Image: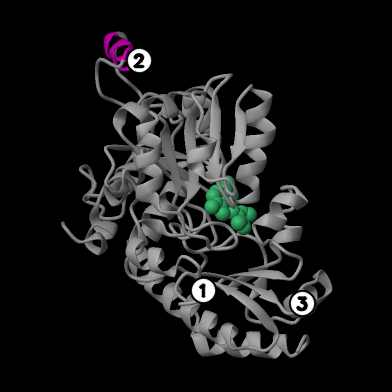
Amino acid sequence: MTHLRTRAVHAGQHPDAASGAIATPITQTTAFGYGTLERGAAIFAGEAPGYRYSRFGNPTVAALESKMANLEGAQAAVAFASGTAATSSVLLGLLSPGDEIVFLGPLYGGTEGLFRQMGERFGIRVVDATQLGLATCLTPATRMVWVETLTNPSLRVHDLTEVAALAKAHGVLTVADNTFCTPWLVRPLEHGIDLVMHSMTKYLGGHGDATGGIVAGSAALIAPVRKTGLGHVGGNLSPQEAFLFLRGIKTLPLRMAAHCEGAAAVAHFLAQHPAVQVVHYPGLASHPQHALAQRLLQGGFGGMVAFELVRNERAAAAAVLNRLQLFTQAVSLGDVDSLACHPASTTHSVVSAAVRAYNGITEGLIRLSVGIEHPDDLIADLGQALTQVV
Ligand code: 4LM
């Protein structure tokens, strides 16, 4: 199974030993009978294999963890009830008071909010290196660097190989949030990044019907994240949701190809539209990191597009968004359905106005999650909505 497209279907899954069922059964149970006191004690001591309680592990969830570890080229993975539970479990599992976390932005507003509000309350210093650069911001207290593989919402590309090498030289852990790219476009561990995390809620599930997160990396790093995130926080993914992700991931490569095709068509359309000032899409030659994106990403440039209106104000964004018919106005992304949102008032409303300003998250910025509909229909919808602000 060398090809990712084959592994997306098969990795982590095999016909059920008892019934032969091909789809991984949903093991809907809280506890697992261990038979004898001695076996129970051995499982709890970690001296014998076996499940004990679904907060710590569950066969359906384990199949998903195994599939995702395989796709990201990792030794191990641990699934959570949301991307945010995955992020907080990485922080709580690996950082201590006095440590610093440095990030290259922009980040999903909820992630930056979590760093600042929860992290700082637990004595973790949060440093935004977006403007000054990573090299300037690393100090002896830096323990972790956080980066998104394609940033939310403005689709900036960071050089993962460079980030990993610089951090490694300082003995600092690196984490890449690969939600926007998925392992279909890039596998951060291949670039030297230590941990990769996802909001599976997005492209991995793909149908807008399940919330989940995952972290993958070496067994040594995943163990404390698992212990804290499942054992102490109790952020475990339910087996029903795990089933939906197992099913969704089987078609990830096919869906990503359609998302990338649609987003490229939409980006090119917007780039020549008189009502549009800037289009953020790494597949456009005008994107500031287009060459880097070409080197880093395989098989396309993703399904997300952001664009700023010439009339760079909230009223203009509202006029366009409120007129869209095929795009649903909603946050989240990666669904087969196309979605559109106004980051400044939604996904990035918790970050400061200053941070929004230097990341280009203006009042006239609209973010599109391009679904798998026919690109011509999406372009027609955008075209009619944009007549409001020409
Ligand atoms: C959104 N995003 O942007 P959960 N990492 C990235 C994300 O975009 C998100 C999360 C983590 C959006 C949600 C409202 C790059 C979320 C957090 O929502 O906790 O699964 O993932 O629209």
Label located before the other in sequence (3 or 1): 3
Measured along the vertical axis of the image, is residue 158 above or below residue 57? below
Q: Which mark is residue 44?
A: 2
Q: Secondary structure at mark 3?
A: loop
Q: Which mark is residue 371?
A: 1
Measured along the vertical axis of the image, is residue 11 above or below residue 390? above
Q: Which residue shows up at 83% across the image and 74% down it? A: 315
Residue 262 position, x and y percent, is 47, 79
In terms of image quadrants, where is residue 184? bottom left
Q: Is residue 128 left or right of residue 149?
A: right
Residue 26 position, x and y percent, is 39, 46
Q: Secondary structure at mark 2?
A: helix
Q: Is residue 32 left or right of residue 345?
A: left
Q: Which residues are magenta?
A: 38-45
Answer yes or no: do the residues labelled 2 and 1 have beta carbons within 8 Å? no
Mark 3 closeness class: few <14, some 14–19, many ≥20 residues within 10 Å: few
Q: Indicate the amino acid at tag 1.
A: Gly
Q: Residue furthest right?
A: 315
Residue 329 position, x and y percent, is 69, 70
Residue pointed to by mark 3: 322
Q: Secondary structure at mark 1?
A: loop
The kind of secondary structure the magenta stretch mainly shows is: helix
Q: Nearer the viewer, residue 375 or 163?
A: 163
